[in-house]
Image (spheres, rainbow, N blue to C red):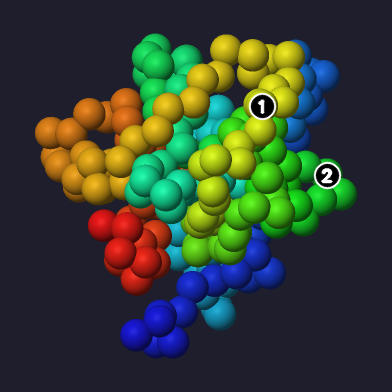
Amino acid sequence: MAERIKTKNLSEIVLREATLTNEQLGFKGHTSVLYRAARTQDDSGNVIQEIHKPGFTVVTRGNWVAALAIDQSDSTILGVIQLRAGCLHETVEIVAGHQEPGMTIEESVLAELREEAGVDEESSECFQIGSFYPDIAYATFRSNLFLVFFDGSKLHEQDLEEGEKGLRLVKVPVKEALENVRDLNGNPYIFGDSQSKMALLLAEPYLRERDLI
């Protein structure tokens, strides 16, 4: 089916854009805002679709990495508790961060596992299970999802950056987490973000292969 669906790529799209820098926005880190207008045209030059709204913005930043970290000894997920400004609530999420400049996505996710969760590369198995656009309408970045199996008896101390000092770890049974994300009335603050939910659903076949659910 996918081969029959034709979508236009960037080279076929008439694009006008201007970027506000981090300094102009007063942001620190990886985020900037892009003011973008674009349209697609057919072979005769007729406009098919156009995006051009006053104030229409696109967030640009480095790609994300996220890891569903599973302790095989007790079939639990290592979750990170953190306060989120968007929902004004503490949430439980999988280990996640940004792809750091000069690092591959694999190197970046292993660094996040060490820093946020104390998971050692030598005592774990890590592989990618998918990637997706968290918000394809308003953002340019992709999230790269990994599944990690680790030995819970070999965890190290967290090595958190200054702005992450309040992060706490919690272990959630795999079966309980899957049931919660599938339940329309489930707790939205436990693996309810797009990265955690997508990673859990993509990981399910691998978890069944290892009799973890």
The one of 198 and 49 positioned closer to us in this rendering: 198
Q: Quadrant of the C terminus?
A: bottom left
Circle 1 is placed at which residue position? 157
The one of 41 and 19 positioned closer to us in this rendering: 19
The tally of labels here is 2
**In the rendered structure, which disc, 2 or 1, sits on the residue that comes first in sequence?**
2
Point out the residue furthest to the right here: 102
Question: At 37% across and 14% down in the image, what residue appears?
Answer: 89
Circle 2 is placed at which residue position? 101
Q: Position of residue 149 (x, y in %)?
A: 51, 55
Question: At 72% across and 42% down in the image, what residue appears?
Answer: 111
Graded by Cα atoms within 10 Å as few (under 14), some (14 to 19) or many (20 or more), the crowding at tag 2 reads few
The reply to whether the C-beta atoms of the residues labelled 2 and 1 are less than 8 Å apart is no
Residue type at tag 2: Pro
The one of 15 and 60 positioned closer to us in this rendering: 60
Question: At 32% across and 31% down in the image, what residue appears?
Answer: 190
Callout 2 secondary element: loop
**Cα gap from disc 2 to disc 1, whole angstroms:** 25 Å
The dot on residue 5 is none
Residue type at tag 1: Glu
Graded by Cα atoms within 10 Å as few (under 14), some (14 to 19) or many (20 or more), the crowding at tag 1 reads few
**With 22 as the anchor, is 134 left or right in this view?**
left
Q: Is residue 210 above or below residue 182?
A: below
